[in-house]
Image (tube, coloured by chain):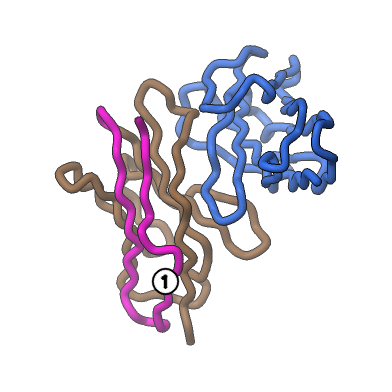
Chain colours: A blue, B brown
Amino acid sequence: DAGVTQSPTHLIKTRGQQVTLRCSPKSGHDTVSWYQQALGQGPQFIFQYYEEEERQRGNFPDRFSGHQFPNYSSELNVNALLLGDSALYLCASSLRVNSYEQYFGPGTRLTVT
Amino acid sequence: AQRVTQPEKLLSVFKGAPVELKCNYSYSGSPELFWYVQYSRQRLQLLLRHISRESIKGFTADLNKGETSFHLKKPFAQEEDSAMYYCALSGKTNAGKSTFGDGTTLTVKP
């Protein structure tokens, strides 16, 4: 089991563009959470998906949206990119929506120029 | 509001010395507290969770509700303990929503 996988590894976008990041959860996991980690800071919760629905959301604008597919994989979409969106985006999966034990992926490094 | 504070950005100790990484939290209720570790070029991984009361790789952490702290301790640091450590909390009703501190980089010198 490769654990949580994310693609792409790195991404460079221009301000105003849109971006889609992808995550495949650890085998057997049905819940996916997304975090944004700015340089020098801890991960910040964006939202969580379970049963193809957004279950919880952090303090992020509507420009951040997501999706979960029937195979439990997930996408994070960010519209109208700002320079401040430059960060490492982490995906974490867990066995159940109310499970505390999260397994993290390696992240996608997004740079907005 | 949930908040986690790790007052030390950097911590350096010699091999064999005791180490304590500080974590203070703010939460209205009974939180679940965690320590995550990220070794060089590896992904973030759970080190320990307060409710399990386990000792992982010689590390322990005690939840002090009076002082709202959850400091991570190890009596004898090893060079392989050098890593970034994050303290995090979740609420009992929102298990998947973790609030992280900004991390402490621990360096264990030979």
Q: Please report the residue visible at 45 percent of the width from the left and 76 percent of the height from the top.
A: B78
Residue that appears at 55% across and 49% down: B45
Q: Which amino acid does label 1 sit on?
A: Leu
Name the secondary structure under disc 1: strand
| Magenta run includes residue B14 | yes
**Residue B31 seen anywhere in this rendered image of the structure:** yes
Whole-percent x, y for residue B98 in the image: 46, 35
Looking at the rendered image, the quarter that the N terminus of chain A falls into is top right
Q: Which chain carries label 1?
A: B
Q: Can residue B60 be seen in this view?
A: no
Residue B102 point in image, percent of width and height: 47, 52
Residue B17 % position (x, y): 34, 80
Tell me where the magenta segment starts and ends, as one range.
B1-30
Image label count: 1
The structure residue drawn at horizontal position 61% and vertical position 20%, both measured from the top left corner, is A49
The answer to whether residue B23 is left or right of residue A17 is left
Query: Left of B105 or right of it: where is A77?
Result: right
Q: Which residue is pictured at 44% across the width and 27% down the height?
A: B95
| Residue of label 1 | B11
Locate residue A46: give its quadrant.
top right
Q: Is residue A108 above or below residue A59?
A: below
Mark 1 is surrounded, within 10 Å at the Cα level, by few (under 14), some (14 to 19) or many (20 or more) other residues, namely some
Q: Is residue A5 inside the magenta stretch?
A: no
In this view, which residue lies farthest toward the left?
B66
Picture layout, residue B56 above or below residue A106: below
